Image: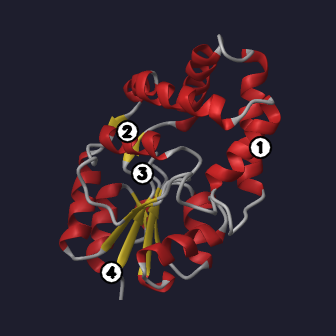
Amino acid sequence: MIRAILFDLDGTLLVNDMDRFMPAYFDRLQVFMASHHPPATLLSALLAAVREAIRRPDPRRTVWERFIEAFERETKRSRDFWAPLFERFYAEIFPSLRVLTEPRVEARLLVERAQARGLRLAVATNPVFPEVAIRQRLEWAGLGDVPFDWITTMENMRFTKPWPEYYLEVAERLQVPPEACGMIGNDLKQDIEPAQQVGMRTFWVCEGGGGWLRKNQGDLRRALQWLEDL
């Protein structure tokens, strides 16, 4: 029996082409930081720190802790230097990226249906952004007011996608066995396969990909039916 649903965010609850979004994000970040750090080395340092945080998980330390330690090392500047700058960036500049995204009416309905069934709800986005950036994107999706039981962020997670341990960690936070969880996401390698590895039921959001042939894949309207059938 399903007791919890995990929702991916970008490309699932929110229309957001990350191949378009991330270059714009990096461009704005480099411009904002230009007077504080050479743009030529900022991006390489940021990417190196993110890669280290993803590839070297440590169940004793959060993604944020691993990232900022690597970023300090790469830039040779302390977190006390960087923290206020990132706070300003996310408050002043990050909101301008909203124009690259679009809410989905079906996403609101899907979340409300799960909520009405008494299921525990998690936003299972890849925790390579801080909480402030993830909560902004939930607002853009029209879901900022939803009382999710858990939202994965850099600050509160120890594993990232596509580690299967990420899904075990979310299930533990929800206090629900993984086999009693369902995962809805649009990325086969990041969302679906690792969730299946730990025993979760899955729905693959793959609009235009022939998903109508199977009950557990298709667009969000089909995900609504999948949820009803669980």
Q: Is residue 201 visible?
A: no
Residue for point 55% across, 44% down: 129
Q: Is residue 21 above or below residue 34?
A: below
Give percent across and percent down for residue 37: 71, 18
Would you name the residue on which mark 2 appears? 136
The numbered dot on residue 111 is none
Q: Tell me the element at label 4.
A: loop
For marks 3 and 2 on the same chain, the one whose residue lies earlier in the sequence: 3
Task: Give the residue at the far front of this rendering.
Answer: 80
Q: Which of label 4 and label 2 is nearer to you? A: 2
Assess disc 3: are there few (<14), some (14-19) or many (≥20) residues with their C-alpha within 10 Å of its C-alpha: many
Q: Amino acid at mark 3?
A: Thr
Q: Is residue 128 above or below residue 3?
A: above
Residue hosting label 4: 230
User: Whole-Å distance between the Cαs marked 1 and 2?
Assistant: 25 Å
Q: Amino acid at mark 4?
A: Leu
Picture quarter containing residue 38? top right
Q: Position of residue 189 (x, y in %)?
A: 63, 59
Q: Nearer the viewer, residue 158 or 126?
A: 158
* Disc 1: which residue: 70
Tag 3–tag 2 contact (CB < 8 Å): no
